[in-house]
Image (cartoon, rainbow, N blue to C red):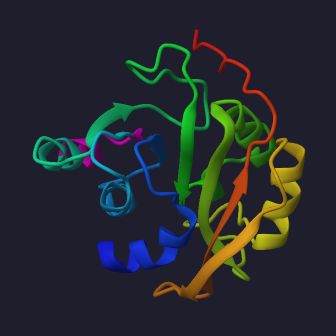
């Protein structure tokens, strides 16, 4: 998938304006680049991944871009810090082809939802109607995302877009909103 296809998949879920977002499980940054195209100048974007090689690719790109992109090496399925956030909340979290790597999607999504400001948005890109495999060990079809979002204290998800995946099945994007006051994210130990 290229950046333009990623923009088509998530564009309708990303509000315009200056904002602070995190792309979790960013890899080499296809969706980070798409999100950077959609956010206004003055925004801040954290690109989080546990793969140092992938982050090195993002770091080389990030020095030349606006909004500010901050690569962070961390495993989003565990507690972590975002440098410079200092307890502030995020306006949005993007999980593009990432949540299906979390064995406990409930726990992970509930923890991540606490990072969101009131009316902060969680955007997900996942496979629909695809069985578990080594590449998608814990599938998150739309119906499962609806249940996970409810348990995490998010609004009823809205299906945004879908497209056939080059790897089989359908990719979909969806968004849900944090309505209540954010709790400060738990500090990593």
Q: Nearer the viewer, residue 128 or 90?
A: 90
The residue depicted at 47 percent of the width and 42 percent of the height is: 21
Asked where in the image residue 85 lies, by quadrant, the reply is top left
Q: Is residue 111 above or below residue 61?
A: above
Could one spot residue 2 in this view of the protein?
A: no
Q: Residue 27 location in percent, x, y? A: 37, 53
Q: Residue 130 location in percent, x, y? A: 69, 80
Q: Is residue 25 left or right of residue 107?
A: left
Examine the structure image and report whether residue 38 is included in the region drawn in magenta.
no
The residue depicted at 55 percent of the width and 40 percent of the height is: 91
Q: Residue 13 location in percent, x, y? A: 57, 65
Q: Nearer the viewer, residue 37 or 152?
A: 37
Region rendered in magenta: 46-56
Q: Is residue 46 left or right of residue 68?
A: right
The residue depicted at 74 percent of the width and 43 percent of the height is: 178
Asked where in the image residue 104 lies, by quadrant, the reply is top right
Asked where in the image residue 164 lies, by quadrant, the reply is bottom right
Q: Is residue 107 above or below residue 133?
A: above
């Amino acid at each position: 998938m290229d950046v333009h296809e990623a923009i088509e998949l998530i564009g309708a879920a990303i509000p315009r304006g200056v904002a602070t977002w995190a792309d979790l499980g960013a890899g080499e940054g296809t969706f980070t680049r798409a999100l950077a195209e959609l956010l206004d100048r003055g925004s801040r974007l954290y690109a989080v991944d546990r793969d140092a090689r992938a982050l090195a690719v993002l770091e080389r790109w990030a020095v030349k871009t606006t909004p500010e992109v901050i690569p962070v090496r961390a495993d989003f399925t565990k507690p972590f810090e975002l440098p410079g956030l200092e307890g502030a909340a995020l306006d949005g979290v993007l999980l593009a082809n990432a949540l299906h790597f979390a064995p406990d999607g409930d726990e992970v999504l509930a923890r991540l939802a606490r990072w969101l400001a009131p009316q902060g948005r969680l955007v997900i890109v996942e496979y629909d109607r695809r069985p578990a495999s080594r590449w998608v060990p814990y599938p998150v079809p739309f119906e499962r995302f609806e249940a996970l979002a409810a348990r995490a204290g998010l609004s009823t998800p809205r299906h945004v877009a879908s497209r056939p995946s080059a790897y089989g099945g359908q990719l979909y994007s969806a968004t849900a909103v944090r309505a209540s006051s954010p709790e400060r994210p738990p500090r990593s130990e």
